[in-house]
Image (spheres, grey):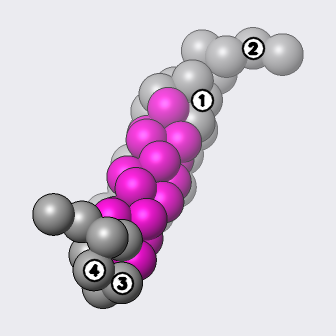
Amino acid sequence: MNWNRPVKFKISGEDWEMPLSILILLIVLALVLMIGGVWMGFRFGSGQLE
């Protein structure tokens, strides 16, 4: 698989193009940050976070 293949997509009328490896990296990073936020929010809401 060619990880440097450019991926083209459109967000709100703007054309974007970036390598596949960078796109996957951004998606994984966003998912990790969302899961961490959910975990911290749950701990804070249940009173376990000091």
Give the residue at mark 2: 2
Identify the residue at image location x=27%, y=80%: 47
For marks 2 and 4, give the CA distance.
47 Å
Label 2: few (<14), some (14–19) or many (≥20) C-alpha neighbours in 10 Å? few
Q: Are marks 1 and 3 in contact (CB under 8 Å)?
A: no
Residue 42: percent from left, percent from top:
40, 77
Q: CA distance from mark 2 to mark 3?
A: 45 Å
Q: Amino acid at mark 1?
A: Leu
> From this viewpoint, which residue is outermost toward the left?
50
Residue 39 spot, x, y in % from top left: 43, 65
Going by the numbered disc 4, the residue's amino acid type is Gly
Give the residue pinned by disc 1. Answer: 20
Residue 23: x and y in percent read 51, 37
Q: Could you tell me which residue is drawn at 84 percent across and 16 percent down?
A: 1
Residue at image mark 4: 47
Q: Quadrant of residue 29?
A: top left
| Separation of residues labelled 1 and 3 (CA atoms) | 39 Å
- The answer to whether the residue labelled 3 contacts the one labelled 4, judged by CB atoms less than 8 Å apart, is yes
Instruction: Kindly identify which residue carries mark 3.
Output: 46
Question: Against 5, is 34 above or below?
Answer: below
In the displayed image of the protein, which residue is found farthest to the bottom? 45
